[in-house]
Amino acid sequence: MSTLFTQLWQNGGFWVGVGETLYMTVASALLAYVIGLPLGVILVITDSDGLTPVVWLNKILSILVNILRSIPFIILMVALIPFSRAILGTSIGNGAMILMLVVASAPYVARMVESSLKEVDKGIVEAARSMGANTFQIIWKVYLPEAKPSLIVGAVISTVTILGYSAMSGTIAGGGLGSIAVTQARPSNAQDVIWLCVALMVVIVQIIQEVGMFVARKVDKRRRTNKKIKQSKNNNSDSNGNAETTDDNGKNSANNAATI
Amino acid sequence: MSNISKIQLINLTKTYPSPAGDVTALENIDLTIPDGSVFGIIGLSGAGKSTLVRCINLLERPTSGQVLIDGEDITKLPKKKLLRLRRNIGMIFQGFNLLEQRTVEANVRFPLELDRIPRDKANARVAELLEMVGLSDKAKSYPSQLSGGQKQRVAIARALATNPKYVLCDEATSALDPTTTESILGLIKDINKKLGVTVVVITHEMRVVESICTHVAVIDNSRIAEVGLVSEVFSFPQSEIAKQLIIPNLIRSLSGGEGTKLRLVFNGEGTDEPIISALAMECRVAANILYADTKNIDGKTFGHMVITVPEETTAKVKEFLDAHNVSYKEE
Ligand SMILES: Nc1ncnc2c1ncn2[C@@H]1O[C@H](COP(=O)(O)OP(=O)(O)O)[C@@H](O)[C@H]1O
Ligand SMILES: [Mg+2]
């Protein structure tokens, strides 16, 4: 066992690393959504077939997003050092890292949000329009709630991506498991420290993934099992086990099997 | 103007721009949809039916022409007023278009939420509507737990939530099986009768028009080919497309054989005595039945029959048919 490992184990350094990683990831993800969610919504509604087409705005935002997304994070990070100094007065520490992570991930989040919203059935949006809903109501009452499961899945993927980025930014700005593994353990070749960091990252990713997917499934009302229907249908005389088909009037009839 | 309350389309044209040149979906459409009617618009796929109905509530902006609702040209309305007007025009769709993440009752409440109706008042209205469409027991269900027919009932309840004067149906029953179609059509007819709602029914299915519409417009290639009362248009379609749609293919392709081919139309007005045997008895003419598609509703006969009679008896037969109040046409 390396001395670094013993040292970190005894002074709780690993847990500090876990805490910093989680803090940076969660804080960055939240801020990235504060920017990325509205940006994604704007990308969808200003699209040429969107609710309020504004083609020039859509083009500009789209290009901006693409540019930011095409710069490798490790380069973007370095490029952002002066920016961080100008805004925060420093280019190291948690604040600087969060700034870099947000700049890098907000465009990513915007695209995730955009693709989730575009999954919403156009027919539902049209129905809302036919009822006289305005643009704001359609965003708030149709797009966001209808895309909720998909948005949650997107948030899980974004968060895991940001977690990965945070390990990278840790090497420059300091802090988190990435920083322990790369700036502390690598020079002394403390393999056990590196591997524990890896294991901790894997566990964190797993937890985020599992919890997120569970929530996404839980909130999705589209493909429920028919257990509930089956139970409520027990008082019906329908005994052919065909739980899915109820007659239009809730009565049993010969057309049960034909009902879509 | 005697009655201003109606939907009127005046010289409506709609073209969609496309890289390969403009697509004309509607051309010089003039149409009046009288108040209280169930107005069918029938045509082949791609004829422009959906575009037409979407122009009525301006989901689609016509390229030129006017849309008058109760005498007011709504293409000139400011945005806010247009949104308000749409509360007065319900719409139902082939794909139901329910909000999948909302319960049945929350779907029906949706238009009331848009109007910021207080929750308890809205809920009372929702309960009333679900009762009307026979789905009170499904209030807490999600759309994915319903059959197609039930989904369409929810959509109808939702379309009626704001007490609209008009309801537009775009292929509302095209995704449903025949039995369910019948029950949904029954519901639409009820709405028209009991609530006095004017209904516009878009369909490519004859039987839909036949079973609930009072008026029908036949649309072909972006233009109105024919329009009138269902009883008239269905009995004696004038345009080629209407004939094609209305008269079963069978009749038209029947090889005549010898003699005069006559198409008899029963629209419930003629006698209900067996006409062919009467013809044989009274005129001593043996008619040859090529095709018959008649049904008896409330003791009255509806449908078509195609017969041939010997050339020389034609005049006599026509006289007989006139006397018995049977409409006919020589084919
Ligand atoms: N958004 C659109 N963009 C381009 N062309 C369209 C659009 N909507 C409809 N069309 C065209 O307009 C014509 C009429 O379409 P539609 O009104 O949907 O017909 P129907 O409902 O009778 O089947 C078709 O040729 C169709 O391809
Ligand atoms: Mg259509």
Image: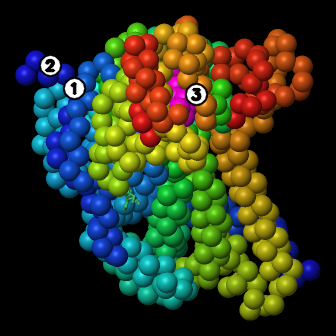
* B308 vs A56: above or below: above
- Structural distance between the alpha carbons of marks 1 and 3: 47 Å
Chain ID of residue with mark 3: B
Closer to the camera, B203 or A109? B203
Decide: few, some or many residues near mark 2? Use Cα within 10 Å; few <14, some 14-19, many ≥20.
Answer: few
Dot placed on the residue nearer the N-terminal end, 1 or 3? 1
* A64 vs B177: above or below: below
Residue B3, numbered circle: 2
Name the secondary structure under disc 1: strand
Q: Provide residue B208's location: percent of width, then percent of height.
A: 50, 31
Furthest residue toward right: A1
Q: Provide residue A130's location: percent of width, then percent of height.
A: 36, 38
Q: Do labels 1 and 3 share a chain?
A: yes
* Residue of label 3: B287
The part of the chain drawn in magenta is: B302-309
Closer to the camera, B232 or B96? B232
* B145 vs A10: above or below: above
Q: Which of marks 1 and 3 is in front?
A: 3
Query: Residue visible at 69% across and 35% down?
Result: A260
* Residue of label 1: B6
Asked whether A86 falls inside the magenta stretch, the response is no
Asked whether B305 falls inside the magenta stretch, the response is yes
Chain ID of residue with mark 2: B
